[in-house]
Amino acid sequence: MTVVADYDYDMIVLGSGPAGQRAAIQAAKLGKKVAVVEHKAVVGGACINTGTIPSKTLREATLHLSGYRERNVYGASYQVKQNITMEDLLYRTSAVIQAELDIVRHQLQRNGVELIAAEAKFAGPETVALAGVDGRGRREVRAKRIVIATGTAATKSASIPFDAQNIVISDDILGLKRLPKSLCVIGAGVIGCEYATIFSTLGVRVTVVDKRERLLDFVDHEIIDTLVYQMRKNRVTLRLGEEVEGLDYSAEDAEHGPRVRVKLKSGKQIVTEKALYSIGRTGATHTLDLAAAGLTADDRGRIKVNAHYQSDVPHIYAVGDVIGFPALASTSMEQGRLAACHAFGIEAKAVPELFPYGIYTIPEISTCGKSEEELTHDGVPYEVGKARYQEIARGAIIGDKTGLLKLLFHADTRKLLGVHIIGEGASELVHIGQAVMAFDGTVDYFVRTVFNYPTLAECYKTAAFDGINRLG
């Protein structure tokens, strides 16, 4: 590996989450000398330690132990384990986190990426000051190119008395000592909706508060309407169009135990055992001294970038959650790869409009391409084809009677424009439609294709026939 004169590294990556990992490994595969700086004791960022991996593993444990997948077959009272505890739920989570940490560290090692445990901040446009390096104090390193992949932290309000047990943020979930009987989720974004459905599946009485009138309005509305129906069926109370004025916590008493009071501006009060504050995330940039590099962040700590993920200082890139929407692990990985390729003059292409979204609510949601609302806004003539899991033999076998797969295609050319799914396996199933769209395929592909039987993939053929029949 060669390093440009007067520089310690060809590239320094700040942060070891999905975006940082992929940027560093891509640069290393191009023969560059790369270092990843991580201030935490473990690699992987929020994705592995407090976010994506823990929440999805917690969800899987919930589905198994609660017997959710079998209830349509064996009845609503069916459970694999009675009296589920937080220890039951976290048993699987701890094992998965350790396995993922080992994989990430091994990937960095075998690609020759140097991992530096230190607090990092800019000391100039090409200089990064490292504090606490192996207990040796402070030193400075220089790199021709720098990638900011520091991710985000849960947004907090100074007026709320967070205590990590009763009034919590999503990062605190893994540290809960016991499963609550009631929970108020403040903020109905992706994280809020995921945890609301996880806890309601466990029998927790959940209330969701959000000042917006709709949940997840970037997702096709029919899919979200189906989710809302399932949430309400599972005893979730939705307080939409409501704003929180304040929270307070009352100490434990012999009769009722600890209580959190959530006061709404409308005058309502929600009394609950625990409250999850989930109003979004803020870019983890406040310790970086961005001004020293000639950069600024917005009021949510996010860094503005161009189509190549370059900041206002061209040799400094930013990728992942720190640049904002969509803030998904999958899209962050791709952003890291593209940034590293651009940084070293390697042509690389992606199709951002075909990035899939996976939302791990119960039931799960996945979507790719345009929604009905977007196509209507753009004046595109389209038709819809639908297949419900209950029509498919595999749906009956697994007991999913509520799943829905929806195809959107151009009414004249029949080109596939969007795939939207809610139900078991949605995040896996969506990739079939994604591949067809990537090759400009038409809905007729699904009519001609033979799918294994019985599988959920047959939904594509059923939905294709449904849509074509609508054309008359």
Image (cartoon, rainbow, N blue to C red):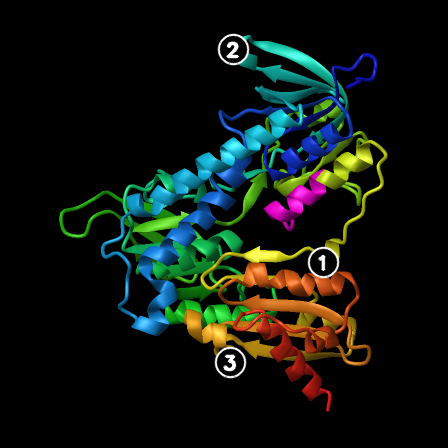
Q: Residues within 10 Å of mark 1 (few under 14, many from 20)?
A: some
Q: Position of residue 181 (x, y in %)?
A: 27, 55
Kindly tell me whether residue 311 is visible in this rendering.
no
Q: Position of residue 332 (x, y in %)?
A: 65, 43
- Type of amino acid at the residue the image marks with label 1: Leu
- Type of amino acid at the residue the image marks with label 3: Glu
Residue farthest along the top direction in this orientation: 136
Q: Where, quadrant-wise, is the C terminus in this rendering?
A: bottom right
Q: Residue drawn 78% across and 75% down?
A: 380
Query: Mark 1 highlights which residue?
Result: 354
Q: Nearer the viewer, mark 3 or mark 1?
A: 3
Q: Disc 1 or 2, which lies upstream in sequence?
A: 2
Q: Nearer the viewer, mark 2 or mark 3?
A: 3
**Magenta-highlighted residues:** 325-336
Query: Mark 2 highlights which residue?
Result: 135
Q: Disc 3 or 1, which lies upstream in sequence?
A: 1
- As helix, strand or loop, the secondary structure at mark 3 comes to helix
- Type of amino acid at the residue the image marks with label 2: Gly
Q: Disc 2 or 3, which lies upstream in sequence?
A: 2
Closer to the camera in the image, 335 or 167: 335
Give the left or right position of residue 222, taking residue 397 as reference: right
Q: Residue drawn 73% across and 73% down?
A: 445
